[in-house]
Image (cartoon, rainbow, N blue to C red):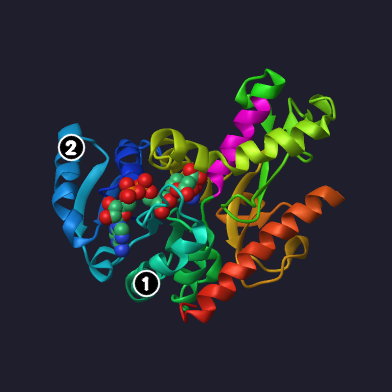
Amino acid sequence: MSKSPVTVAVTGAAGAICYNLLFRIAAGDMLGTDQPIKLRLLEITPALKALEGVVMELDDCAFELLDSVEIGDDPNTIFDGVNLAMLVGARPRTKGMERGDLLEANGAIFTAQGKALNAHAADDVKVLVTGNPANTNALIAQSNAPDIPAERFNALTRLDHNRAIAQVAQKAGVPVSAVTNMTIWGNHSATQYPDVFNARINGENAFEVLGSDFDWVENTFLPTVQKRGAAIIDARGASSAASAANATLEHVQNWVLGTPESDWTSMAIPTSGAYGIDSGIISSYPVTVTDGTTSVVEGLEINDFSRAKIDASVAELREEAAAVKELGLI
Ligand code: NAD
Ligand code: LMR
């Protein structure tokens, strides 16, 4: 018997990330090639015409799994009964713009969307925020959705996770599949901390396999991963789109279908004390998802260098949270 459709809302649906995301969702790359999908696509009014063009292209793919596509500019309608909400739409950072500048601009969007999800989403809804500043936008949405369990709100750090894996694989001269147990801690920003000390290469400690080269970790690996988003904006004149779409899809895939048995992934989740990070922010952690339950990987060794970097990123998240609280958004 065929599965009943899952209703997936995606915002910013006429934007660059979604142009790389929607077709893969409809093809079954995210939830499996036996899972029918109902797509609900949200845009702002001026972008609805462009979105109609995207829908024509979705039609023209004749995806067998695509049960229906609805578009609109009202989150209350688009989020009605959704099982998954992928909040991609936001104002992207452009050259010279700091992430802090985005807090206020995006606050209104995520307040309204949090309220609409609270009122209309299905009981099992999971919400992933990709739109920047992702962690704090997720916090705003979560704070405005008091009836949805807090842990159903995640922010995307999977792109950073994948970037860190790629850098380690290139340095070690191994395929990316050899690099496991990577962790991004903290904020999806330049303060994020990609943790090579707990990563593995072919099952061995990655730092040691790389020759215990602390200088490379501190002066090449960290800044490369932390500033990769800005480097792409500088090179392309626009923020990452295909890789961000891929990471968004992989996050949801692991969240719904689970993480591989011998590995973990990075997800920004509401904090509740693990690794000394008190509640009140949405911070990236090493997590596993088993039988639908997300768990922080416990017992990792955090050296002094790592602790200081994690603390700095967490401090930035607390500053962002304080700023949006001051603005009355949470
Ligand atoms: P884009 O400008 O191409 O598309 C964004 C779309 O969102 C636009 O079509 C816009 O009309 C729409 N939008 C704006 N406000 C909306 C609202 N209230 N409701 C619905 N739609 C709305 O940008 P993009 O390249 O697709 O990037 C989207 C976001 O993702 C940006 O904030 C970007 O910074 C962020 N991003 C995050 C990561 C990450 O790893 N977390 C990586 C890359 C990009
Ligand atoms: C990225 O990491 O590529 C983006 O978050 C960069 C940005 O600010 O849009």
Q: Position of residue 307 (x, y in %)?
A: 80, 54
Kind of element beneath mark 1: helix
Give the class, few, some or many, for how many residues have Cα within 10 Å of label 1's Cα (few <14, many ≥20): some
Which segment is the magenta one?
157-169
The mark that comes first in sequence, 2 or 1, is: 2
Q: Is residue 290 visible?
A: no
Q: Position of residue 157 (x, y in %)?
A: 56, 49
Q: Quadrant of residue 316?
A: bottom right
Q: Quadrant of residue 280?
A: bottom right
Q: Quadrant of residue 243?
A: top left
- Report the disc number at residue 108: 1
Of residues 257 and 236, the one nearer the viewer is 236
Q: Position of residue 306 (x, y in %)?
A: 79, 49
* Disc 1 residue lies near ligand 1 with CB under 8 A: yes
Residue 167 lies in the magenta stretch: yes
- Residue 325 higher or lower than 32, as above or below: below
- Residue 135 higher or lower than 150, as above or below: above
- Name the side, left or right, on which 311 lies relative to 111: right
Residue type at mark 2 is Glu
Give the class, few, some or many, for how many residues have Cα within 10 Å of label 2's Cα (few <14, many ≥20): few
- Name the side, left or right, on which 23 lies relative to 53: right
Return the residue at label 2. 57
- Which quarter of the image is occupied by the N terminus? top left
Residue 188 lies in the magenta stretch: no
- Name the side, left or right, on which 295 lies relative to 61: right
